[in-house]
Image: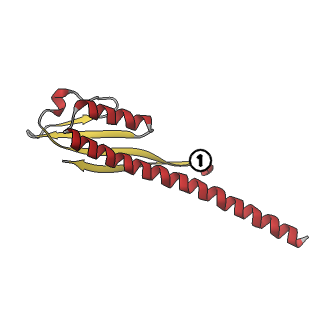
């Protein structure tokens, strides 16, 4: 009888470890995907020279992936403009842009434990 109880306890803890490990791998994967998206957004902004269509496409792509992306454009005169899902880019915003600050918000989820925390990634495009 003692062997049966030890066997079931071993199987229970093994399954618990398997489920928690799977949850953690999924959360780490989501964090890595967010990091990759931020890097891709920076490269696309720099390569397109802050094109309006590219800016709006990057914001829309972030929304599709459940990220919140905010890009603060800086121009030569010292003005700055914030581009996000609620404030799309216009030609007047990108005129004489010299750089941008990128802020990406994503959520780190562990559904098994009902945990969800906000995380932010920052970058600078030149």
Residue placed furthest toward the right: 1
Q: Is residue 93 above or below residue 1?
A: above
Give 118 or 76, whichever is nearer the viewer: 76
Which corner quadrant holds the N terminus? Answer: bottom right
Q: Position of residue 57 (x, y in %)?
A: 32, 32
Q: Position of residue 38 (x, y in %)?
A: 34, 47
Residue placed furthest toward the left: 77
Question: Pointer 1: residues within 10 angstroms few (<14), some, or many (20+)?
Answer: few
Residue appearing at x 60%, y 59% in the figure: 21
The answer to which quarter of the image holds residue 52 is: top left
Answer with left or right where residue 35 lies relative to residue 102.
right
Q: How is the image coloured?
A: secondary structure
The answer to which quarter of the image holds residue 87 is: top left
Q: Secondary structure at mark 1?
A: helix
Answer with left or right where residue 79 lies relative to residue 60.
left
Q: Which residue is mark 1?
A: 111
Residue appearing at x 8%, y 38% in the figure: 77
Residue placed furthest toward the front: 47
Residue appearing at x 22%, y 42% in the figure: 47
Residue placed furthest toward the bottom: 2
Q: Is residue 118 above or below residue 93?
A: below
Give 12 or 45, whichever is nearer the viewer: 45
Badge count:
1
């Amino acid at each position: 009888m003692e062997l049966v109880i030890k066997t079931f306890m071993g199987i229970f803890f093994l399954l618990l470890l398997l489920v928690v490990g799977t949850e953690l791998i999924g959360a780490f994967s989501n964090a890595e995907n967010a990091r990759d998206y931020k890097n891709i957004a920076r490269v696309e902004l720099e390569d397109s020279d802050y094109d309006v269509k590219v800016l709006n496409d990057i914001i829309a792509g972030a929304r599709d992936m459940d990220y919140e992306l905010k890009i603060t454009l800086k121009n030569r005169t010292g003005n700055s403009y914030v581009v996000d899902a609620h404030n799309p880019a216009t030609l007047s915003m990108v005129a004489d842009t010299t750089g941008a600050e990128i802020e990406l918000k994503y959520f780190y989820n562990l559904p098994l434990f009902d945990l969800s925390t906000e995380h932010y990634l920052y970058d600078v495009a030149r």
